[in-house]
Image (spheres, rainbow, N blue to C red):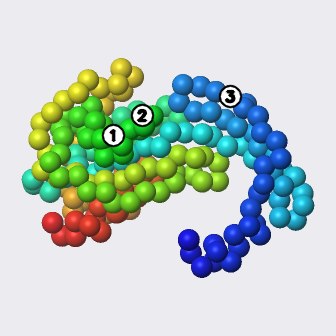
Amino acid sequence: MATQDKAHAGAWEEPTIAASTAYEGDLIQVRLETVSLPDGRELTREIVDHPYSVCIVPVDGDNNVLMVRQFRKAVEAFLLEAPAGKMESGEDPGATALRELQEEIGHTATHLEALGNFYVAPGWCTQMIHAYVARELVPARLEADEDEFIEVVRVPMADIPNLIGDGTIRDAKSVASLLLAMRVLGDN
Protein backbone atom coordinates (compact mmCIF):
# COMPACT_ATOMS: atom_id res chain seq x y z
CA MET A 1 0.00 0.00 0.00
CA ALA A 2 1.39 3.41 -0.95
CA THR A 3 2.21 5.89 1.83
CA GLN A 4 -0.68 8.12 0.82
CA ASP A 5 -3.06 5.13 1.00
CA LYS A 6 -1.86 4.23 4.52
CA ALA A 7 -2.36 7.81 5.68
CA HIS A 8 -5.98 7.78 4.52
CA ALA A 9 -6.88 4.17 5.35
CA GLY A 10 -10.10 4.16 7.30
CA ALA A 11 -10.62 7.93 7.09
CA TRP A 12 -12.01 7.91 3.55
CA GLU A 13 -13.56 4.47 3.42
CA GLU A 14 -17.25 4.08 2.59
CA PRO A 15 -18.94 1.58 4.92
CA THR A 16 -21.92 -0.18 3.33
CA ILE A 17 -25.22 0.53 5.05
CA ALA A 18 -27.50 -1.47 2.72
CA ALA A 19 -27.07 -3.56 -0.42
CA SER A 20 -29.32 -5.09 -3.04
CA THR A 21 -28.97 -6.80 -6.40
CA ALA A 22 -30.42 -4.80 -9.29
CA TYR A 23 -29.53 -7.30 -12.03
CA GLU A 24 -28.02 -10.77 -12.23
CA GLY A 25 -26.97 -12.11 -15.63
CA ASP A 26 -24.76 -14.88 -16.94
CA LEU A 27 -21.62 -12.70 -16.93
CA ILE A 28 -22.25 -9.77 -14.60
CA GLN A 29 -24.19 -8.80 -11.53
CA VAL A 30 -25.15 -5.22 -10.70
CA ARG A 31 -25.27 -4.29 -7.02
CA LEU A 32 -26.67 -1.15 -5.46
CA GLU A 33 -24.84 -0.28 -2.24
CA THR A 34 -25.86 2.55 0.01
CA VAL A 35 -22.69 3.82 1.65
CA SER A 36 -21.78 6.31 4.33
CA LEU A 37 -19.41 8.98 2.99
CA PRO A 38 -16.60 10.42 5.15
CA ASP A 39 -18.63 13.63 5.67
CA GLY A 40 -21.63 11.65 6.97
CA ARG A 41 -23.83 11.84 3.88
CA GLU A 42 -25.29 8.68 2.35
CA LEU A 43 -24.98 7.79 -1.34
CA THR A 44 -25.90 4.82 -3.52
CA ARG A 45 -23.05 3.25 -5.52
CA GLU A 46 -23.77 1.13 -8.60
CA ILE A 47 -21.24 -1.70 -8.74
CA VAL A 48 -20.79 -4.24 -11.52
CA ASP A 49 -19.42 -7.59 -10.34
CA HIS A 50 -17.44 -9.19 -13.17
CA PRO A 51 -15.18 -12.27 -13.01
CA TYR A 52 -11.44 -11.69 -13.03
CA SER A 53 -9.91 -12.03 -16.49
CA VAL A 54 -6.64 -12.41 -18.36
CA CYS A 55 -5.09 -10.55 -21.28
CA ILE A 56 -2.22 -12.11 -23.20
CA VAL A 57 0.38 -10.59 -25.52
CA PRO A 58 1.45 -13.54 -27.72
CA VAL A 59 4.71 -12.86 -29.56
CA ASP A 60 5.85 -15.17 -32.37
CA GLY A 61 9.42 -15.96 -33.45
CA ASP A 62 9.38 -13.05 -35.94
CA ASN A 63 8.51 -10.53 -33.18
CA ASN A 64 4.90 -10.16 -34.27
CA VAL A 65 2.07 -9.87 -31.77
CA LEU A 66 -0.85 -12.16 -32.62
CA MET A 67 -3.88 -9.97 -32.03
CA VAL A 68 -7.58 -10.50 -32.64
CA ARG A 69 -10.05 -8.32 -34.49
CA GLN A 70 -13.66 -8.70 -33.47
CA PHE A 71 -16.90 -6.75 -33.43
CA ARG A 72 -17.81 -5.30 -30.05
CA LYS A 73 -21.53 -4.58 -29.81
CA ALA A 74 -21.24 -2.22 -26.82
CA VAL A 75 -19.21 0.26 -28.89
CA GLU A 76 -20.58 -0.76 -32.33
CA ALA A 77 -17.08 -1.18 -33.75
CA PHE A 78 -14.46 -3.71 -34.77
CA LEU A 79 -11.56 -3.54 -32.32
CA LEU A 80 -8.01 -4.82 -32.60
CA GLU A 81 -7.24 -6.46 -29.26
CA ALA A 82 -4.82 -8.71 -27.45
CA PRO A 83 -6.39 -12.14 -26.78
CA ALA A 84 -8.28 -12.18 -23.49
CA GLY A 85 -10.98 -13.93 -21.55
CA LYS A 86 -12.58 -14.47 -18.19
CA MET A 87 -11.32 -16.86 -15.57
CA GLU A 88 -13.60 -19.72 -14.65
CA SER A 89 -14.36 -20.18 -10.95
CA GLY A 90 -11.25 -21.51 -9.21
CA GLU A 91 -9.15 -21.39 -12.39
CA ASP A 92 -5.52 -20.26 -12.16
CA PRO A 93 -4.81 -17.11 -14.22
CA GLY A 94 -1.92 -18.80 -16.07
CA ALA A 95 -4.15 -21.74 -17.01
CA THR A 96 -6.80 -19.29 -18.21
CA ALA A 97 -4.20 -17.51 -20.35
CA LEU A 98 -3.10 -20.75 -22.04
CA ARG A 99 -6.73 -21.79 -22.63
CA GLU A 100 -7.64 -18.43 -24.13
CA LEU A 101 -4.63 -18.53 -26.47
CA GLN A 102 -5.80 -21.88 -27.81
CA GLU A 103 -9.41 -20.72 -28.17
CA GLU A 104 -8.68 -17.36 -29.77
CA ILE A 105 -5.49 -17.71 -31.82
CA GLY A 106 -5.02 -21.48 -32.12
CA HIS A 107 -1.69 -21.57 -30.24
CA THR A 108 -0.32 -22.31 -26.81
CA ALA A 109 2.97 -21.07 -25.38
CA THR A 110 5.92 -22.87 -23.81
CA HIS A 111 6.95 -19.59 -22.13
CA LEU A 112 4.31 -17.60 -20.25
CA GLU A 113 5.41 -14.63 -18.14
CA ALA A 114 3.16 -12.71 -15.76
CA LEU A 115 3.32 -8.94 -16.34
CA GLY A 116 1.11 -7.79 -13.46
CA ASN A 117 -2.55 -7.06 -12.96
CA PHE A 118 -4.86 -4.07 -13.00
CA TYR A 119 -8.48 -3.08 -12.42
CA VAL A 120 -10.50 -2.25 -15.51
CA ALA A 121 -12.75 0.45 -14.06
CA PRO A 122 -12.49 0.54 -10.24
CA GLY A 123 -15.01 3.37 -9.96
CA TRP A 124 -17.83 0.99 -10.78
CA CYS A 125 -16.54 -2.51 -11.62
CA THR A 126 -14.77 -5.32 -9.69
CA GLN A 127 -13.03 -6.83 -12.74
CA MET A 128 -9.27 -7.31 -12.45
CA ILE A 129 -7.15 -8.38 -15.42
CA HIS A 130 -3.99 -10.48 -15.12
CA ALA A 131 -1.63 -9.62 -17.99
CA TYR A 132 0.84 -12.05 -19.57
CA VAL A 133 3.35 -12.18 -22.38
CA ALA A 134 3.44 -15.52 -24.22
CA ARG A 135 6.43 -16.65 -26.26
CA GLU A 136 7.59 -19.80 -28.01
CA LEU A 137 4.15 -20.29 -29.55
CA VAL A 138 3.08 -23.76 -30.63
CA PRO A 139 -0.03 -24.56 -32.70
CA ALA A 140 -2.76 -25.95 -30.44
CA ARG A 141 -6.45 -25.26 -30.92
CA LEU A 142 -9.40 -25.50 -28.57
CA GLU A 143 -12.99 -24.93 -29.66
CA ALA A 144 -13.72 -21.18 -29.63
CA ASP A 145 -16.65 -19.77 -27.68
CA GLU A 146 -19.81 -20.15 -29.74
CA ASP A 147 -20.49 -16.40 -29.74
CA GLU A 148 -17.00 -15.28 -30.82
CA PHE A 149 -16.16 -14.51 -34.43
CA ILE A 150 -12.48 -13.60 -34.45
CA GLU A 151 -9.88 -12.76 -37.08
CA VAL A 152 -6.25 -13.30 -36.03
CA VAL A 153 -3.98 -10.41 -37.10
CA ARG A 154 -0.16 -10.46 -36.91
CA VAL A 155 1.17 -7.03 -35.93
CA PRO A 156 4.92 -6.27 -35.83
CA MET A 157 5.92 -5.37 -32.27
CA ALA A 158 7.66 -2.25 -33.65
CA ASP A 159 4.27 -0.97 -34.93
CA ILE A 160 2.47 -1.27 -31.57
CA PRO A 161 3.34 2.22 -30.18
CA ASN A 162 2.07 3.94 -33.34
CA LEU A 163 -1.10 1.81 -33.42
CA ILE A 164 -1.81 2.79 -29.82
CA GLY A 165 -0.97 6.43 -30.55
CA ASP A 166 -3.22 6.71 -33.61
CA GLY A 167 -6.17 4.96 -31.92
CA THR A 168 -6.08 1.77 -34.01
CA ILE A 169 -5.60 -0.11 -30.72
CA ARG A 170 -7.95 1.57 -28.27
CA ASP A 171 -9.11 -1.19 -25.98
CA ALA A 172 -7.80 -0.39 -22.47
CA LYS A 173 -6.85 -3.95 -21.49
CA SER A 174 -4.89 -4.34 -24.72
CA VAL A 175 -3.15 -0.98 -24.39
CA ALA A 176 -2.15 -1.68 -20.79
CA SER A 177 -1.00 -5.24 -21.49
CA LEU A 178 0.93 -4.26 -24.63
CA LEU A 179 2.73 -1.45 -22.79
CA LEU A 180 3.63 -3.82 -19.94
CA ALA A 181 4.89 -6.38 -22.47
CA MET A 182 7.00 -3.79 -24.31
CA ARG A 183 8.67 -2.87 -21.04
CA VAL A 184 9.63 -6.52 -20.48
CA LEU A 185 10.54 -7.37 -24.08
CA GLY A 186 12.52 -4.21 -24.83
CA ASP A 187 13.91 -4.27 -28.37
CA ASN A 188 13.39 -8.04 -28.85
156 lies left or right of 10: left
Q: Secondary structure at mark 3?
A: strand
Tell me if residue 164 can be seen.
no
165 to 96, vertically: above or below:
below
Instruction: Assign a secondary structure to mark 1.
Output: helix
The CA distance from mark 1 to mark 2 is 8 Å
Whole-percent x and y of residue 148?
36, 27
What residue does disc 1 label?
96
Q: Which residue is mark 3?
A: 23
| Amino acid type shown at disc 2 | Glu
The kind of residue on which mark 3 rests is Tyr
**CB contact under 8 Å: marks 1 and 2:** yes
- Mark 3 vs mark 1, foreground winner is 1
Q: Earlier in the sequence, mark 3 or mark 2?
A: 3
Residue that numbered label 2 is attached to: 88
Residue under the image location 26 percent in, 41 percent down: 98
Q: Which residue: 58% across, 47% down?
A: 126
Q: Residues within 10 Å of mark 3 (few under 14, many from 20)?
A: few
Which quarter of the rendering shows the N terminus? bottom right
Q: Give the alpha-carbon distance from disc 3 to disc 2, as whole Å.
A: 20 Å
